[in-house]
Image: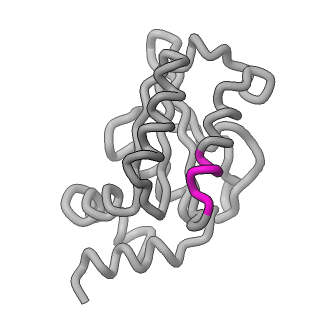
Amino acid sequence: MTKVNQIQKALLELGGGQFQKLADAYLVEKGFGSVNSIGSVIGANKAGKGTPDAFVMSPGGRFTFAEHTTQQSGLINKLKDDLNKCFDEKKTGVPVEKIEQVIFCFTSELDTADANELLEACEEEGVKLELFGLSAITFDLYLKYPNLPRDFLG
């Protein structure tokens, strides 16, 4: 089995809390800044309640929100629901005009139509979108950040 296949298989076996910890570390490695993991239970591999799962505040006072999921079936509905929550000031305490971008990390793949649907929803709000599915995360872990699969996936 190739290393890429091993990484993909290990990612698919992660629970939600484990994947959130890995995804937050992945975003730090990608250079998004200081990630605040508000949707993760401190000291445990458990997902907590909260929207978004993590955020980064830029020096200019704008926010990057990150949502992570291991959900396989009905992924587009889950991501649309998470996006709507990110745009709900009552849930986040942040007005949409202060959100610079939304990042999704997930252990599945989206087709182009679903990716475009999310992109259009973000464009309507003036928010950038970044999608990191199973393939993108796997190749980054394999080629750019080999310490993360060693530490998180064994």
Q: Which residue is at the front of the view, 83 or 110?
A: 110
Q: Residue 92: name its quadrant.
A: top right
Query: Residue 6: percent from the left, percent from the top?
Result: 33, 81
Question: Residue drawn 44% across and 55% down?
Answer: 110
135 shown above or below 8: above
Q: Is residue 77 magenta?
A: yes
Give the residue at x 42% y 45%. Answer: 113
**Residue furthest toward the left?**
143
Which residue corresponds to the image point at 43% horizontal and 74% vertical from the top-left?
153
Residue 152 place in picture, x, y as percent: 45, 69
Image quadrant containing the C terminus: bottom left
Q: Is residue 7 located in the magenta-colored stretch of the structure? A: no
* Residue 43 in picture, x, y percent from top left: 66, 59
Quarter of the figure with residue 72: bottom right
Q: Which residues are magenta?
A: 74-79
Image quadrant holding the N terminus, namely bottom left
Tell me if residue 101 comes above or below residue 66 in the rendering. above
Residue 5, how many percent across, how many down?
30, 79
Residue at 37 percent of width and 74 percent of height: 8
**Residue 12 position (above or below residue 41):** below
Q: Residue furthest bottom?
A: 1
